[in-house]
Image (cartoon, helix red, strand yellow):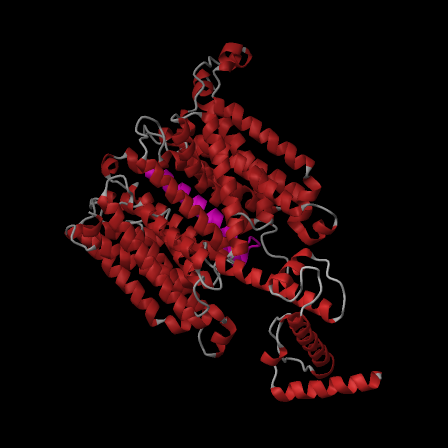
Amino acid sequence: MLWSALSLTLGYNATLVTLGATLLGIATGISGTFLYLRKNALISDAISHATLPGLGAAFLLMTTAGLDGRSLFGLLGGSAISAALGLMIVTWLTTKTRLSQDAAIGSVLSVFFAFGVVLLTVIQAIPAGRQAGLETFLLGSTAGMLFNDAVLILVLGAITTAILLLFRRSIIVVSFDAHYAQTLGISPQKIDYLVLAVALAVTVIGMKIVGLILIVALLIIAPVAARFWSEKSNTILLISGIFGGLSGYIGTAISATAPGLPTGPIIVLCSFILFLISFLLAPRRGILASARAFLVFQTTVHMTQGLLSIAQNQPIYEPKTKRLLQRGGFVRADGVATQAGHALAAKTLLNERRWTYWRSKMRQTGALDEPIVYSLVNIETKLTQDQIKSIDQGLSLQQQDKL
Amino acid sequence: MGSDFITLSLTPLLIGICASMACALPGNFLLLRKQALIGDAISHVVLPGIVVAFLFTGQVSTWPMMIGAAVAAIIAVLLIEFICRVGKIESGAAMGVIFTSMFAGGVLLLEQSDTSQVHLDVEHALFGNLESLIWLDAEGWASFFDLNALAGLPLELVRMMTVLLVIVIFIYIFWRPLALICFDEPYARTRGIAATALGFALVTLTAIAAVAAFDAVGSIIVIAMIICPPAAARLMVNSLRSQVIYSQVLAVIATVVGYILAGYAPLWLGFSNTLSAAGMIATMSGVFLAFAALFGPHRRRNI
């Protein structure tokens, strides 16, 4: 069952929905990355909740005009308009009043959503509204999707992804350095609006599949997960798109296998699992890698301190340092340094003296700006042979002065 | 104002007022600490907490669900903090990851478990059931002095009043340190105030208010009330004390006006149905915020 869902042989509609969800996942993954890089991650929460009154109003308008109120195109159009209004209000509140962005987002999302709920109760009161099924837009529903709806979602998903890829370069530049972008003649504000417009479009498209409450998850989780794997924007974008697409694809397939597996939540949980994997296992940024790096650092500090103490004939009291030195064979069980210990200690002390001399006499501003703890780093890996030679000459001159 | 009003509308109105006040009080401080969206996160994670509590006890009983919701809220806050610090992700994004995933988990649990026997669904979680909290034993104003009738008061009212009282007492006791951590946290730390603990206590308090209010009025009111009245008050006045007082007044007015509009306005217009009271109350708080943002004397940033 799951296999046939994954291999797209479960029937025509299920296949369309799966493809639609996959495309939606890719589009949300990519546009969400831009929002995340511009520190706008939660603005999508306001956008998605602000769709509800537009949905209700569109239904009421279409019904009053004698049309079919359930036309997906009309409903999505209404949602897009009210979401855009909500977005404008968030921007206006943030720039023109002294409210911070989070307060603006929170107030718009709760008030718009509340007004949408009021409209839903109005709709339930009219005869046509009882079977409108507008509640399905809250949590998404792919069960009764019509062929035309699936095609609409496919086409819109493809268009938004294409727009994003078209403007990829300028958006990346703006995301990382808005000032630099301006010197290139790219207007950061315009790009911001473009990304928000795409996020809005994606939100509206995703309402039918994932539901407006959970669409924000797709715009946030995949980008955050992708961020763990790379420092390069292009790679993050690619991974985020892949994660989003995978979640959409696998999630829809799983939810097609049995009743009681709602599509939206399953897709969200799939992307959450991808996030967990990234959070734990990603090289350099994942938890395990960070923990390992910390342990290595700790060991290096203990070893260096211990070896410096040996070199200067000072006793070592710290138990962990003792243990590490013994294990490395630099100190005997009675605390006396071995041959190897003395050799390495002399090296460590020389390294320390060279660094001290370099920092006091030769360091120029801007040289070696990386945040390193000098004593823990072998100077020969950081400076050239010539520099070290002149440091050693300086050190020997110092020695002669002392004598 | 006949006995009808007391039976059908007085208790929902009182519950709504207490809920709004209880949410708006800590909201004032969250707003100043730029944590306004914590309310949003909390009200989303309440759902899985309630569902898990229901699965454990097998019945819709108040206390297990309250405890489950509170535990879920606290777990969510801790997780957000953890992901933020360990994963080096900005807090907004960390919040987004955690609360949406927990909400999705809650919905999935709901769909998987057999809750057809009981009144527990996502829509209830969002919209509450304010209109149904009626006082059946009331016969008129005299019922307030009738012990038998008082025993029939909706439990939610007693609970909401207790929570409101707890929050008022907490804020009264910790007023000065709270004000300090809102305006100048580093300085507060130098004065020996445990800012982290106090901040966490504030979030916990918000969670308690949200959970207690949630059952009666749904999560929409909770988010709206945590943010809108304090935000409107912030645009109107410039001192913390007046801001808190104004926010409380606005919360009460929004609740009363919203409730009346939802319950009676359709009847005045000749319709027979009522509108969602929770939605209307939250909408009213938004209307007040809109006025404050347009005309509030302190709406602009002080340059």
Name the foreground residue: B162 vs B198. Answer: B198
* Span of residues in magenta: A93-120
Residue A183, x across and y down, in percent = 49, 78
Q: Say if B84 sits above or below B199 in the image.
A: below
The quadrant in which residue B126 appears is: top left
Using the rendered image of the protein, determine whether residue B280 is visible from the camera's viewpoint.
no
Residue A150, x across and y down, in percent = 21, 53
**Across the whole image, how many numbered discs are drawn on residues?**
0
Drawn side of residue A152 relative to residue A377, left or right:
left
Is residue A367 located in the magenta-colored stretch of the structure? no
Residue B98, x across and y down, in percent = 45, 48
Q: Residue at x 66, y 47 (%)?
A: B195
Q: Residue at x 47, y 45 (%)?
A: B41
Name the foreground residue: B181 vs A342. Answer: A342
Q: Say if A35 sits above or below A357 in the image.
A: above
Drawn side of residue A246 relative to residue A320, left or right:
left
Q: Residue at x 70, y 85 (%)?
A: A391
Name the foreground residue: A334 vs A151. Answer: A334
Q: Look at the magenta stretch and give its main secondary structure.
A: helix
Using the rendered image of the protein, determine whether residue A120 is visible from the camera's viewpoint.
yes
Q: Say if A236 sits above or below B18 in the image.
A: below
Residue A80, x across and y down, in percent = 33, 54
Is residue A103 located in the magenta-colored stretch of the structure? yes
Quarter that holds the C terminus of chain A: bottom right
Drawn side of residue A276 relative to residue B193, left or right:
left
Q: Residue at x 45, y 55 (%)?
A: A280
Name the foreground residue: A249 vs A339. Answer: A339
